């Protein structure tokens, strides 16, 4: 049984190369061999063997061609499954992940029908490897566990060792290095017991990786060298490339940059012959980092740009879910290049890369929507052949000028010394801030954070806790033991460094483009030293990226062409208030329970519906079934109900969807939970959707922004979405929403109307921003 496979755990900002093992199904069953004699060694068997030979020589593209040919010539299910399993591995190793998923699943179905449990386990393990490369770790763990059970039941020690090592890798990318080491050592012992030299080389490399993560560089080098020696004896090109790359990184950690670069270049030469874009990108990333450490900035930039080109090629065929998850495994390369460009005093080029490193999947979704509905993109966005591509600096300037807005983009830089694998980030050491003025002028500042002060992550969390954030609408509990100057500290770090470049007219729109934890910051409530809130000085909007902002603008422009310019009160509105609440799962171990009612939401919905001259849907009338019918044609959608932040997370609810749901009345046809997953499939006509509910602006924070209700609404075609950043209090929220629509009726745009509503509620609660600062407008102001 041949072993092969690799995946790259991510460091911030440095990446290491790790290994995962795959099965190659290399044996021709005896019955098939006998058939081949009768047919004088059929073309299919020759193509199959040619594929194995090409694979073993590291010629992945040739292996794919041979196995594809073999597949077209053979009808026997068992042989087809064998070919499909191997073809999936070749797809995996050349970065064709969707093909790998589909072909693995086809092989799995055949082996399952034939009751071949051992083969099912092997394919499950290979399928898990693809999930890991896509960043879908929950699916990977489930597939590995299924595979491990099959191996243990059949007494297959080799398979047990392989899967144990792969599970160790999952622990490693989650930062559990000591547990990973335990798994790797067990797997190594099995490989030596079975005299499996290739498996031994894999395990040695991963053990070195774990020690490297623990900053034990001498041990790491020792294990890398042992792995390399075996790989060279076996003439295993892929293993050699990875071992050389890891050695280069460890040598660079000892400040021996020239020697490290030599190792990287040897590794890169091999990787390019293997046509493995993932491996090539990781080596280029680490090579670029080493050039940066050696202060060879031009060479560092060149290598990082080449790495990004390889990473981009991996996302061409992925669906939205995997575009999001794989991008989270790649984002550090974009961040590293931005750091290099800042070090070269190229802030505008760094802004382009900052944009390239965020919200790419949502931009792809919106671009596909435009293409499917023949929407002609307006403004600068229309100049791109692919509107999901990040904007150039000239497009960014043009957007600010055409829209007459000020753009603020934030980027967080982790400490270089941080050695944690996976998506977790280390302490933030710097904040990069770009301001694009309505004139098109670009300003830049970088804020260095003191290691002696609370981390930015803690500061953001504590600012929310000090205001009081709870589950449900109301019942806020202030944590009075926390310092009360959190909002002023955030203002000092995030606003003061750029304050001189912000507009002096409070009505001028300012679009904030956060990153990571900054999505949770209540920017409206940030206070300067004089105690003034930011919303008193500026009209605020948010967006996951500048490209997304240009696309939501195009969506709104198209609506203006296709929809008559009615006054607000002439627009078709769908208004929901306090529906009969559905039952939700608390967890898989507990019975479901009904959500509590929201009495104040009734008055809120009735008053807002009155503005539009329509009847609100209250109680039993507000069924999910009816809302699904109406929501796709309404121009204004207002939902005053419960928002469920985590609903849809598999670990909690036993289902897997985009997390987030809106509570509506259940009926015979629906459970009353309008999920983010369902919303994203809609084709909305609404120019504005307001979710007057708890936590509707939250979700899973990724490189694509927040994955949840707000993103689903934008992806479904809503150019303007108002959502909340915490569990909002019932009565003040109802008042704020009524005032928001009253301001809209007076002719203000959406951002100005939300600001005026906040200012009016602020008069009643001047020291309690939790009562008025939760809501944010994402997307279009007009």
Image: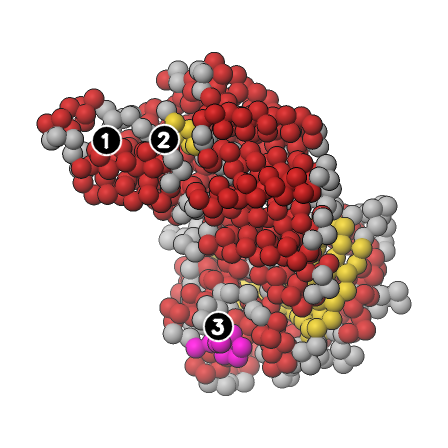
Looking at the image, residue 733 sits to the left or right of residue 24; the answer is: right
Residue bearing the label numbered 3: 384
Residue at 33 percent across and 29 percent down: it is 25
Task: Give whichever of 495, 663 is nearer the camera.
Answer: 495
Residue range of the region highlighted in magenta in the rendering? 376-384
Res 24 label:
2
- Up-down: is 166 above or below 471? above
Question: How many angstroms separate mark 1 from mark 3 (CA)?
Answer: 48 Å
SS of the residue at dot 2?
strand
Looking at the image, residue 301 sits to the left or right of residue 121; the answer is: right
Question: How many angstroms separate mark 3 from mark 2 (CA)?
Answer: 43 Å
Quadrant that contains the N terminus: top left
381 inside magenta stretch: yes
SS of the residue at dot 3?
loop
SS of the residue at dot 1?
helix
Task: Give whichever of 386, 516 is nearer the camera.
Answer: 386
Marks 2 and 1 in Cβ contact (< 8 Å): no
Q: Residue furthest left?
A: 38
Residue at 52 percent across and 37 percent down: it is 241
Residue at 67 percent across and 46 percent down: it is 290
Residue bearing the label numbered 1: 78
Q: Is residue 156 visible?
A: yes
């Amino acid at each position: 049984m041949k072993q092969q496979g690799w995946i790259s755990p991510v460091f911030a900002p440095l990446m290491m190369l790790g290994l995962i093992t795959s099965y190659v199904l290399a044996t021709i069953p005896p019955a098939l061999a006998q058939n081949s004699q009768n047919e004088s060694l059929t073309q299919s068997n020759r193509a199959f063997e040619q594929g194995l030979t090409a694979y073993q020589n590291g010629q992945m593209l040739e292996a794919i061609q041979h196995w594809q040919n073999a597949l077209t010539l053979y009808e026997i299910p068992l042989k087809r499954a064998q070919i499909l399993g191997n073809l999936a591995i070749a797809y995996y190793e050349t970065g064709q992940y969707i093909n790998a998923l589909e072909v693995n699943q086809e092989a799995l179905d055949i082996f399952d029908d034939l009751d071949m449990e051992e083969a099912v386990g092997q394919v499950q393990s290979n399928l898990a490897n693809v999930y890991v490369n896509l960043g879908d770790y929950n699916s990977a763990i489930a597939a590995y566990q299924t595979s491990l059970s099959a191996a243990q039941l059949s007494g297959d020690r080799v398979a047990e060792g392989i899967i144990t090592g792969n599970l160790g890798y999952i622990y490693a990318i989650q930062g559990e290095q000591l547990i990973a080491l335990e798994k790797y050592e067990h797997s190594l012992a099995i490989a030596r017991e079975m005299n499996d030299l290739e498996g031994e080389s894999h395990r040695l490399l991963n053990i070195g990786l774990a020690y490297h993560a623990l900053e034990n560089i001498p041990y790491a080098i020792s294990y890398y060298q042992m792995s390399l020696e075996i790989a060279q004896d076996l003439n295993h090109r892929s293993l050699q490339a990875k071992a050389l790359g890891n050695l280069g990184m460890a040598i660079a950690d000892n400040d021996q940059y020239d020697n490290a670069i030599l190792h990287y270049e040897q590794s890169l030469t091999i990787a390019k012959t293997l046509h493995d874009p993932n491996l090539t990108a990781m080596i280029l990333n680490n090579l670029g980092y080493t050039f940066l450490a050696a202060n060879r900035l031009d060479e560092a930039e060149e290598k990082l740009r080449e790495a990004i080109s390889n990473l981009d090629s991996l996302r061409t065929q992925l669906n939205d879910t995997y575009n999001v998850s794989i991008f989270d495994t790649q984002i550090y390369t974009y961040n590293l290049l931005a750091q290099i460009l800042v070090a070269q005093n190229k802030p505008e080029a760094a802004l382009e890369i900052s944009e390239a490193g965020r919200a790419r999947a949502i931009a792809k979704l919106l671009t596909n929507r435009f293409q499917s509905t023949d929407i002609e993109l307006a403004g600068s966005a229309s100049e791109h052949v692919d509107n999901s591509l990040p904007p150039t600096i000239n497009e960014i300037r043009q957007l600010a000028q055409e829209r007459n807005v000020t753009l603020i983009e934030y980027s967080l830089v982790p400490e270089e010394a941080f050695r944690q694998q996976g998506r977790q980030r280390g302490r933030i050491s710097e904040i990069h801030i770009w301001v694009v003025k309505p004139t098109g002028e670009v300003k830049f500042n970088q804020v260095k954070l003191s290691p002696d002060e609370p981390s930015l992550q803690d500061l953001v969390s504590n600012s929310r806790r000090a205001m009081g954030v709870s589950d449900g609408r109301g019942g806020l509990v202030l944590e009075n033991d926390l310092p009360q100057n959190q909002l002023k500290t955030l203002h000092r770090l995030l606003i003061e460094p750029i304050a001189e470049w912000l507009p002096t007219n409070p009505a001028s729109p300012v679009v904030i483009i956060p990153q990571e934890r900054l999505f949770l910051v209540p920017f409206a409530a940030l206070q300067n030293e004089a105690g003034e809130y930011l919303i008193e000085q500026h009209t605020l909007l948010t967006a996951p990226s500048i490209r997304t902002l240009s696309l939501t603008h195009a969506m709104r422009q198209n609506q203006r062409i296709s929809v008559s310019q009615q006054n607000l009160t002439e627009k078709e509105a769908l208004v929901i208030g306090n529906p009969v609440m559905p039952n939700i799962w608390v967890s898989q171990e507990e019975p479901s329970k009904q959500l509590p009612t929201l009495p104040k939401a009734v008055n809120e919905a009735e008053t807002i519906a009155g503005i539009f001259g329509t009847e609100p849907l209250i109680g039993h009338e507000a069924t999910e079934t009816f809302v699904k019918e109406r929501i796709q044609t309404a121009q204004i959608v207002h939902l005053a109900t419960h928002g469920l932040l985590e609903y849809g997370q598999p670990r909690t609810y036993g289902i897997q969807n985009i997390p987030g749901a809106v509570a509506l009345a259940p009926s015979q046809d629906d459970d009353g939970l309008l999920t983010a997953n369902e919303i994203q499939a809609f084709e909305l006509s609404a120019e504005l959707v307001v979710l007057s509910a708890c936590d509707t602006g939250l979700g899973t924070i990724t490189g694509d922004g927040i994955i949840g209700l707000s993103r689903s609404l934008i992806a479904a075609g809503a150019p303007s979405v108002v959502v909340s950043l915490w569990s909002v209090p019932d009565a003040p929220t109802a008042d704020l929403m009524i005032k928001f629509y009253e301001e809209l009726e007076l002719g203000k745009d959406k951002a100005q109307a939300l600001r005026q509503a906040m200012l009016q509620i602020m008069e009643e609660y001047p020291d309690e921003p939790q009562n008025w600062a939760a809501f944010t407008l994402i997307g279009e102001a007009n």
